Image: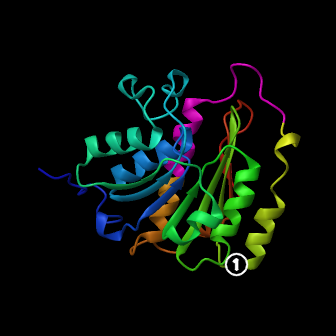
């Protein structure tokens, strides 16, 4: 028996999906993949060299059975458990522009941990006509941002590149306040919604679709907002 996407198929169905590229299937990346699968995406290409550790379980899609397993293998198992028709092209290594640029095709999700990695990946999607927009996330404990980049727009590319600082300039978060699972789920779901909106043939043009930066804040004084 196959999975039916009838409930939301009038807006987004498997036939509307393209291959989804995810660089980094840790907290945000793994949840983006999982939510995308629930929406009907069935072709994934992923990069990650890490293994599943015990501290990953609360904020990532993996279970106890996946501890010490490469994240790319665990990612595939979790998604195929939901929908056996899903295909995952796995790269058990970190993304390198010089090596992997020509493999990209479709929307690109960028959820790596370092600014240096972002700077290298920039060279892979800049003016790469096979890439169908870039969705980059940055998370603190109670705040986050999603940057949507038109990779064929030189102004947007330069603005995004200019926002990248050096890794040494980013302070460490307080002990035990580095990742909030509720924020991860919120950002992941919203990111997938934006990707689906971009690909949906029935989606009316919304002002929100043209926004390049989307901000999230879980502090009591500020509501989640976009601009």
Q: Is residue 141 visible?
A: yes
Q: Is residue 174 magenta?
A: yes
Residue 151: quarter of image: bottom right
From this viewpoint, which residue is outermost toward the right?
Answer: 169
Whether residue 175 appears in magenta in the rendering, the answer is: yes
Q: Residues within 10 Å of mark 1 (few under 14, many from 20)?
A: few
Write the residue at 74% across / 71% down.
157
Could you say whether the residue bearing mark 1 is in a helix, strand or loop? loop
Quadrant of the frame with the C terminus = bottom right
Query: Residue 170, how many percent across, how many down?
Result: 83, 39
Q: Is residue 208 visible?
A: no
Residue at 36% across / 51% down in the picture?
37
Q: Nearer the viewer, residue 203 or 170?
A: 170
The percent coordinates of residue 216 (x first, y second) are: 66, 44
Would residue 111 appear left or right of 164 to someone viewing this image?
left
Q: Where residue 78 appears, x then y in whole percent?
A: 34, 39
On screen, residue 172 versus residue 80, left or right, reads right
Judged left or right of residue 70, residue 115 is right
State the extent of the magenta-drawn residues as a range: 171-190
Residue that protrudes farthest toward the front in the picture:
99
| Residue 49 coordinates in the image, percent (x, y) | 54, 43
Q: Residue at x 51, y 26 (%)?
A: 53
Q: Is residue 72 above or below residue 204?
A: above
**Is 226 rendered above or below residue 114?**
below
* Residue at which label 1 appears: 153
Colour scheme: rainbow
Residue at x-position 20% and y-position 51%: 3
Front residue (pair 10, 118): 118
């Amino acid at each position: 028996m196959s999975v039916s996407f009838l409930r939301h198929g009038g807006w987004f169905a498997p036939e509307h999906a393209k291959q989804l590229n995810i660089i980094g299937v840790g907290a945000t990346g793994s949840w983006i993949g999982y939510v995308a699968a629930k929406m009907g995406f069935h072709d994934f290409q992923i990069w990650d060299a890490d293994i599943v550790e015990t501290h990953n379980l609360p904020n990532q899609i993996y279970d106890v059975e996946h501890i010490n397993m490469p994240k790319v293998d665990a990612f595939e198992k979790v998604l195929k458990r939901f929908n056996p028709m899903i295909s995952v092209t796995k790269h058990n290594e970190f993304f390198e522009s010089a090596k992997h640029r020509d493999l990209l095709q479709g929307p690109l999700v960028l959820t790596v941990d370092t600014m240096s990695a972002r700077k290298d990946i920039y060279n892979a999607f800049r003016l790469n006509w096979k890439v169908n927009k870039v969705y980059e996330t940055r998370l603190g404990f109670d705040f986050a941002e999603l940057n949507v980049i038109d990779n064929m727009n030189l102004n947007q590319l330069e603005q995004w590149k200019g926002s990248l600082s050096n890794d040494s300039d980013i302070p460490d978060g307080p002990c035990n306040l580095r990742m909030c699972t509720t924020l991860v789920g919120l950002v992941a779901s919203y990111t997938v919604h934006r990707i689906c909106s971009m690909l949906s043939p029935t989606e009316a043009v919304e002002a929100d679709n043209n926004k390049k930066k989307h901000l999230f804040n879980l502090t009591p004084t500020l509501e989640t907002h976009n601009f």
